């Protein structure tokens, strides 16, 4: 975890450096991120969430062990050294089992943490902020800290049994829930300095009482709400002045920076401002799958212009049908108005379409799209029409004319903004 510990050390020395965390289980997005960090000589911090990957398979069907195997196999194929991949677990705790009693959910969480750490995940977000079916709402700070300490002990035991580098931890949670707000009219409220202090103090006291004082130097991050969020079609941009007091507070803690969730769709300047304000870890997820979806939709438009209609992939229709067949991932988030609902399903910033790429019919349609355009490369004029930025990259010789290269370049344009914010180049 030297990269993460060094980043915190640099922050404390006054340097505006950070690291971005790619939060996705989408294989093509992961490969695009690997190509990007390889090209730019960076380290890939890749995180899976507890609802994506867990002992029951999550919505991806992958356990922590199978996810790691997928990632390392892909890294070997791409040529990215294994030591330049850091695996993390996001929102690890009772999140997936809130319908159970607290003790049942925590028992499941123990297994979750053990499997993540045993599989080689070394950046662990301990998040026990969610209420279970027999809990009060919201939970008290002491309860959250006690449960986090319990899971930290499980993680430490798993690390000692499996060997390797010691894990680092992140505590706290953001408001609202992961994945963006449900209502574009919601007023965004920053975490107060008092609440952030309380979270740190209670966790430190609880960890000490649990015999985990030796772990505290490896708790490198605190999740707060810095005033950064996105809804269905709205983005709340970072305002450094509003977070000034928070930034000053965290800078007094020698081993800790802020971790900013939901930084998706911020401008490059806003991302750089976050890093300067001691938000040293920037999480990005839906923006990457949003860019992936944009690329796939653009490629389908090219396909429809270029390929015989009888063999076209029908990717968009297949995706929308999958969403209608199983509405559980989007129904409570999107409009009930049929016209707006269709707009949300296809284009919302929350990108809940990302849950449907593993669907077998969708996978087949995407494979068909890629096959059609690989076997019949489209003319530059169609690429210029539907993917103008990729057209210019082709003309400049930056990428090859292949479907994957077009997709990866689209995703890389997002990652370039994070690279510029986290690894600023010295002025000449």
Image (cartoon, rainbow, N blue to C red):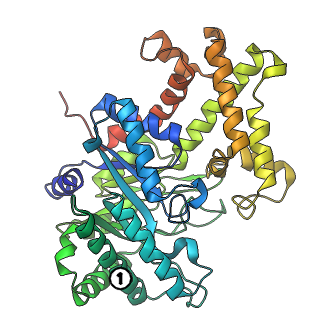
Q: Residue shown at 31%/68% (left/top)?
A: 245
Q: Position of residue 343 (x, y in %)?
A: 76, 46
**Vertical comparison of 61 with 399: above or below:** below
Residue 375 visible in image = yes
Q: Position of residue 295 (x, y in %)?
A: 60, 31
Q: Residue shown at 78%/23% (left/top)?
A: 312
Q: Quadrant of the C terminus?
A: top left
Q: Position of residue 172 (x, y in %)?
A: 39, 72
Q: Residue shown at 54%/58% (left/top)?
A: 52
Q: Is residue 329 left or right of residue 279?
A: right
Residue denoted by label 1: 150
The quarter of the picture where residue 385 lies is top right
**Vertical comparison of 54 with 130: above or below:** above
Of 412 and 270, nearer the camera is 412
Of 199 and 32, nearer the camera is 32
Of 385 and 369, nearer the camera is 369
Give SS at disc 1.
helix
**Vertical comparison of 364 with 428: above or below:** below
Q: Residue shown at 42%/37% (left/top)?
A: 74
- Circle 1 Cα neighbour tier, 10 Å, few/some/many (<14 / 14–19 / ≥20): some
Q: How many marks?
A: 1
Q: Quadrant of the N terminus?
A: bottom left
Instruction: Looking at this view, name the residue that lies furthest to the left.
Output: 13
Q: Position of residue 100 (x, y in %)?
A: 60, 83
Residue 417 visible in image = no
């Amino acid at each position: 975890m030297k990269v993460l510990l060094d980043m915190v050390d640099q922050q404390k020395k006054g340097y505006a450096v950070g690291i971005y965390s790619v939060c996705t289980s989408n294989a093509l997005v992961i490969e695009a991120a690997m190509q990007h960090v390889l090209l730019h000589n960076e380290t890939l911090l890749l995180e899976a969430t507890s609802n994506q990957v867990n002992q029951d398979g999550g919505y991806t069907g992958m356990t922590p062990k199978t996810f790691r195997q997928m990632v390392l196999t892909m890294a070997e194929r791409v040529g990215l050294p294994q030591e330049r991949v850091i695996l993390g677990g996001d929102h690890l705790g009772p999140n997936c089992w809130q319908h159970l009693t607290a003790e049942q959910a925590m028992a499941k969480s123990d297994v979750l943490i053990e499997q993540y750490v045993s599989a080689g995940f070394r950046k662990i977000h301990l998040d026990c902020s969610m209420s279970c079916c027999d809990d009060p709402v919201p939970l008290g700070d002491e309860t959250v800290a006690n449960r986090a300490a319990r899971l930290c002990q499980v993680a430490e035991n798993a690390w000692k049994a499996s060997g390797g580098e010691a894990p680092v931890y992140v505590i706290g949670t953001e408001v609202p829930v992961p994945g963006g707000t449900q209502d574009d009219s919601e007023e965004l409220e920053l975490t107060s300095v008092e609440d952030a202090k309380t979270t740190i103090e209670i966790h430190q006291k609880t960890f000490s009482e649990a015999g985990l004082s030796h772990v505290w130097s490896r708790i490198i991050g605190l999740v707060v709400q810095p005033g950064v969020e996105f809804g269905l079609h709205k983005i709340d941009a970072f305002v450094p002045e509003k977070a000034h007091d928070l930034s000053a507070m965290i800078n007094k803690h020698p081993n800790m920076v802020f971790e900013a969730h939901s930084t998706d769709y911020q401008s490059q300047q806003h991302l750089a401002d976050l890093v300067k304000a001691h938000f040293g870890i920037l999480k990005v997820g839906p923006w990457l799958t949003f860019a992936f979806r944009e690329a796939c939709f653009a490629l389908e438009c090219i396909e429809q212009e270029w390929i015989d209609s009888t063999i076209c992939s029908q990717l968009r229709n297949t995706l929308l049908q999958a969403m209608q067949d199983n509405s559980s991932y989007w129904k409570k988030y999107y409009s009930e108005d049929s016209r707006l609902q269709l707009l949300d399903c296809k284009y919302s910033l929350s990108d809940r379409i990302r849950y449907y790429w593993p669907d077998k019919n969708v996978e087949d349609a995407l494979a068909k799209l890629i096959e059609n355009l690989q076997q019949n490369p489209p003319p530059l004029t169609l690429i210029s029409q539907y993917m103008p930025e990729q057209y210019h990259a082709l003309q400049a010789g930056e990428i090859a004319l292949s479907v994957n290269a077009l997709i990866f370049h689209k995703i890389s344009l997002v990652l370039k903004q994070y690279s510029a914010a986290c690894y600023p180049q010295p002025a000449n």
